[in-house]
Amino acid sequence: MIENRRLSGGSHLLRVRDEHARRDTPQSQPGQFAQLLAHPSQHLVRRPMSIHDEGDGWRSFMVKPVGPATRELVALRAGDSVDMTPPLGKGFPAPGELGEGPVFLVGGGFGVAPMHFMARILDGLPQAPEYRILYGGRTRNDVELDVLAGVNGEVLTSTDDGSLGFHGTCVDLCATQLDALGAARAARAVVLTCGPHAMMHALHGAVARRVHALYASLEEVMACGVGVCMGCVAKTRDGWVPICTHGPVFRSDTVFDLEGTADHV
Amino acid sequence: MIENRRLSGGSHLLRVRDEHARRDTPQSQPGQFAQLLAHPSQHLVRRPMSIHDEGDGWRSFMVKPVGPATRELVALRAGDSVDMTPPLGKGFPAPGELGEGPVFLVGGGFGVAPMHFMARILDGLPQAPEYRILYGGRTRNDVELDVLAGVNGEVLTSTDDGSLGFHGTCVDLCATQLDALGAARAARAVVLTCGPHAMMHALHGAVARRVHALYASLEEVMACGVGVCMGCVAKTRDGWVPICTHGPVFRSDTVFDLEGTADHV
Amino acid sequence: MSESTREFPIRIGPASFQNPYFAASGCFGYGLEYAESIPPQELGAVVTKTVTPLPRAGNPVPRLQETPAGLLNSIGLQNVGIEAYLRDKLEPLVAAGGVPFVSISAATLDEYVRMAEMLAPYDSIPAVEVNLGCPNVDAGGDRDAAEARAVEQFTRTVKERLPDKAVAIKLTPNVTDIVLLARAAEQGGADAVVAINTLAAMDIDLVRGRPTFERVRAGLSGPAIFPVALLKVWEIAAAVRIPVVAVGGIAQAEDVLKFFMAGATAVQLGTVLFSNPELLRQVRAGVREFVQARGLQHPHELCLDHVPESAEGRAQWTPIG
Amino acid sequence: MSESTREFPIRIGPASFQNPYFAASGCFGYGLEYAESIPPQELGAVVTKTVTPLPRAGNPVPRLQETPAGLLNSIGLQNVGIEAYLRDKLEPLVAAGGVPFVSISAATLDEYVRMAEMLAPYDSIPAVEVNLGCPNVDAGGDRDAAEARAVEQFTRTVKERLPDKAVAIKLTPNVTDIVLLARAAEQGGADAVVAINTLAAMDIDLVRGRPTFERVRAGLSGPAIFPVALLKVWEIAAAVRIPVVAVGGIAQAEDVLKFFMAGATAVQLGTVLFSNPELLRQVRAGVREFVQARGLQHPHELCLDHVPESAEGRAQWTPIG
Ligand SMILES: Cc1cc2nc3c(=O)[nH]c(=O)nc-3n(C[C@H](O)[C@H](O)[C@H](O)COP(=O)(O)OP(=O)(O)OC[C@H]3O[C@@H](n4cnc5c(N)ncnc54)[C@H](O)[C@@H]3O)c2cc1C
Ligand SMILES: Cc1cc2nc3c(=O)[nH]c(=O)nc-3n(C[C@H](O)[C@H](O)[C@H](O)COP(=O)(O)OP(=O)(O)OC[C@H]3O[C@@H](n4cnc5c(N)ncnc54)[C@H](O)[C@@H]3O)c2cc1C
Ligand SMILES: Cc1cc2nc3c(=O)[nH]c(=O)nc-3n(C[C@H](O)[C@H](O)[C@H](O)COP(=O)(O)O)c2cc1C
Ligand SMILES: Cc1cc2nc3c(=O)[nH]c(=O)nc-3n(C[C@H](O)[C@H](O)[C@H](O)COP(=O)(O)O)c2cc1C
Ligand code: FES
Ligand code: FES
């Protein structure tokens, strides 16, 4: 590990060495993840983490300490070793596939990590599309704006208690933003989201039909990370498929509002 | 942990903070041990380690990496935390109880650690008794003389292959030393030993009857360290007793040459 | 301090205990060995090292081997025998304010008769645990007790002679269906079942090229077995009406809370005590916090609904003022 | 590379394998998913994800939970079904040089008949593993297979229809005496027994206040269970004359060496593959070094003397030039 920086709300930004990583021709796509574990670790199974950025010789991750393995990770110091897989899964559509309309990057909690990566890539395009990051949390403490440092695009925040930015959820915020665009422009918009399942589900209900496309990055407990163990499945139109290989990013209409998923949360 | 110093043969000298420790009025006796484990650790059970020295606010240990838990310990860096029990068990007789004759401290492998502590204490006495450290190993690499740095007494070494010091075992060396003393002085000598079971057993056979007393520090796999689990027993004249509380130091004639112990090794 | 240890009292048959946190047999000696770091009076009860009709020297060394998140032991019930126990070990524990939950084991019904009769006169002993699950002895070990019929008979034999004491039957997990054994214990008149003893397992010493333990088979304990113990407790709690005392791998308050959710009336701390003498205090604090945060009065209210309602009152607790 | 993987060949019934290192069922998919880090042709065989007569969707999520040194799974045999397996999955593995050891499971004898008949014509399948130990399904799982009579019947049914293939019977450890099941498999004509499947266990989600898995009961795998698996393999190897394939918690070469000492003919790598794709190479190097250092030719020579001599030749190996 190269660097461990504590963020404003208690998450950590970890920068991990990877000789194949490249800033300008990244080996990974936003929405892809890697599996990480401290090395040595008290744990058996590496934990999936969305890629927050890729630089020359490193990749970064935003790790929220929610349990023993993530606490172990954030306790590491520069120089300690980390066990890290190559980038896994299918990320968000490439910038070229986002169409001409406005792009909304909607992140909740550590779901903002892949939004940072996407924004940084959009910023680097000769003709950056118009995009906004909508970043929501319960309270201002959950909105760790320093994780988005260096991003050019506009960042709008929302908090459930109104302590920062828009008073409400980022689902409401996104709906408001689409309202402001007008139906025609909204219909050309693409929304990318990552965050708690309930939030993404609500976002699907609120905006999927009004926009060109909504892509959501799903989360499930993982072991192998490569479609072998069948541990991390989601019900899609094609049946139960591993999130780690068929996702984690799915078009929302292929995974939400299907029979049998309603009670997933 | 305050300091981790690699010794010449691959063992490590670990200095661990303990606010109760005192150089001049040590809380522990040579031959006592503490149970150590890296913290956090991949292991469940703390490992017994003879106390190598006690200073103001610290205790030191000579750790030989022979398996996973000792390898974990020697990989620690200054500043890392260590889980350490208070001093446990019964050590060697106090200096005042060693009598007037010469004292031999016979250590094999990491068994030299408590000999360092004993020597350092003898050195500090107003009238230090005459003592010698006999330190044996298979080859010169096993004789890590730097672990005895600062000791005033004479150090004699032996190696099975003759690559350093006396050519033979430290049992032979001890016998030779006693021969040189003459029977009468030898009969007043006290021998303290710590090392592989087979070595101590042989030493008992070779010298116990010629000297005033031989004390041996036994080794057995431990869990509780306080006489609860009955895991670490040795057969003594009083039956099977926990080494961790009744020892690890025993008068050799109470534990060797009893029925049922011959096949222990 | 004694205030805080008198918390969440429980009942098992005729006996009551100031709290539901016990020490597991074999992991706390006869009760005083750990007194410096864990005063026995802070525990709900001390389940003592299993005593047998005669003293036992136990198995050859080595007797212990660490495994991933576990500990193998082949102690072989080394103990002073019931006579010396009653003469030398019982009183000091009681004098120190500890509550002895005496663990016994025997190879035959006759021996159980004799042991029960020896224990009966001691008013200072509120409870007896019958260890039917030791994998480390030849006679009277887990293999002899794998039959429901045997469990019922052993239970009845002991309970008939100890009507005023809580009699708890400790079961082996090394069976196809532990529920059958628990039901047999209930049928035999047990006041509680205790689950689980160690899992049968072994290790091999590669250097010496032979099994680590002379008896080959040893008992696996520690965090590694917690998920197994949890299932056994869950299954038993759903099937019997007597209290279930949960033991196996407890390493933190969360584990204890899970046992309560699975229907345990009390828990026993074992292997992890060897390396974490703070465990009792951590458990106490963690359970208290969780229970209070949910506005409950007693961790028994955490019990999930797999447990038949009729069984819920099995270990009625009475809030203490 | 292919030179070094052709090392310590073994035989199981009519089939031979280039080395004794297999992938465990459910831990290597249908054989190609891991190909980038673990080329299937480096394994002695790939035991495929268990296939059933019809496709199965498996159990609800969550399906996984880590425990101390272990992994709980409640996959529920999600698989494409035997038809799709034979149509889509078999050939690509064979084409890549992998050796398919096809794992099957069914709920009734009739279904086993049908599956065996479907497999019989495929010359590219040298071996079939019958999974009688899954704790995560209702019908055909470990509880149905806890009876020796059932094991013998299932075995005979499959083997009669697959005389030219190696038929291995995978047993559940969740029984009082696994040796009875192993003997029943032998009696039914099995070419090998495979031990062990996962230990029955569970976890509880404290936050949601309910069992982590919808079916409550799940299967525990990983290093935590190694000492249990080792004892089962030891006991079985001493009691039957057919080869024993060892599986359970292998995390390093030392574990594999212990299984060989306990009498295993081959081993399967499982859970630890998920986090250590180097495991196969580490095992290969570690076993080779140990065997060579002792001047042996084959790890089968490590087998200790609890195994009857008559059984030692059970998996004769022929040194390859
Ligand atoms: C595709 C993907 C991307 C993710 N990206 C991030 C990220 O960028 N930053 C971040 O902090 N977290 C991320 N997570 C979540 C992260 O993996 C979990 O928080 C972590 O595994 C928890 O481990 P723990 O031991 O600390 O906590 P535990 O106590 O084990 O679990 C806490 C919570 O995490 C879930 N969880 C446990 N194990 C796993 C596992 N192996 N896989 C997934 N979830 C698990 C549990 O269901 C539980 O709800 C991501 C998860 C997925 C699937
Ligand atoms: C009283 C006493 C004093 C000791 N003093 C020292 C010392 O000063 N320096 C030193 O390097 N070592 C000392 N040891 C030995 C040390 O405890 C073991 O080397 C250590 O436990 C090995 O652990 P491991 O995980 O590294 O190796 P493992 O692979 O677990 O074991 C390697 C060897 O150590 C033995 N061992 C394993 N666990 C234990 C245990 N809990 N207790 C005792 N032995 C065990 C095993 O039998 C095996 O032979 C002492 C042991 C005792 C009993
Ligand atoms: C060293 C040791 C000795 C034990 N001795 C006994 C015993 O004498 N009687 C008994 O009923 N259980 C005995 N046990 C089993 C424990 O009481 C307990 O059932 C088991 O270890 C599981 O709990 P744990 O994982 O918390 O240790 C012993 C366990 C260990 C580790
Ligand atoms: C995620 C997962 C899925 C499994 N699926 C199967 C299966 O389909 N069929 C089977 O026979 N065993 C299955 N098993 C059991 C393994 O093959 C193996 O018997 C067990 O995990 C013990 O070995 P291990 O500890 O090395 O993993 C599965 C295990 C895991 C962890
Ligand atoms: S984590 Fe194994 S299939 Fe996705
Ligand atoms: S280590 Fe437990 S009695 Fe000595």
Image (spheres, coloured by chain):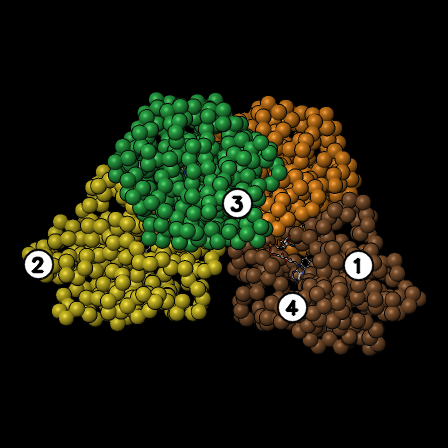
Chain colours: A brown, B yellow, C green, D orange
Q: Position of residue D288 (x, y in %)?
A: 51, 49
What chain is tagged by disc 4? Answer: A
Q: Is residue A43 visible?
A: yes
Asked if labels 3 and 1 share a chain, the reply is: no
What chain letter is assigned to the residue under label 2? B
What type is the residue that disc 2 sits on? Arg
Which residue sits at x=41%, y=59%?
A: B83
Badge 4 amino acid: Asn
Cα distance between the residues tagged 2 and 3: 72 Å
Precedes in sequence: disc 1 or disc 4: 4
Q: Are marks 2 and 3 in contact (CB under 8 Å)?
A: no
- Circles 3 and 4 on the same chain: no
Q: Which residue is mark 3?
A: C298
Residue that appears at 83% across and 64% down: A175
Residue type indicated by callout 1? Leu
Task: Give the foreground label among 2 and 3.
Answer: 3
Measured Cα–Cα span from mark 3 to mark 4: 34 Å
In this view, the residue farthest toward the left is B184
Give SS at disc 1: helix
| Chain assignment, label 1 | A
- Residue B238 as seen in the image, left or right of residue B42: left
**On the image, numbered disc 1 is attached to which residue?**
A203
Disc number at residue A141? 4
Q: Residues within 10 Å of mark 1 (few under 14, many from 20)?
A: many
User: Mark 2 and mark 1 in contact (Cβ < 8 Å)?
Assistant: no
Name the residue carrying label 2. B185
Q: CA distance from mark 1 to mark 4?
A: 22 Å
- Residue A109 is marked as none
Which residue sits at x=75%, y=64%?
Answer: A168
Q: Quadrant of the N terminus of chain C?
A: bottom left
CA gap between label 4 and label 2 equals 78 Å
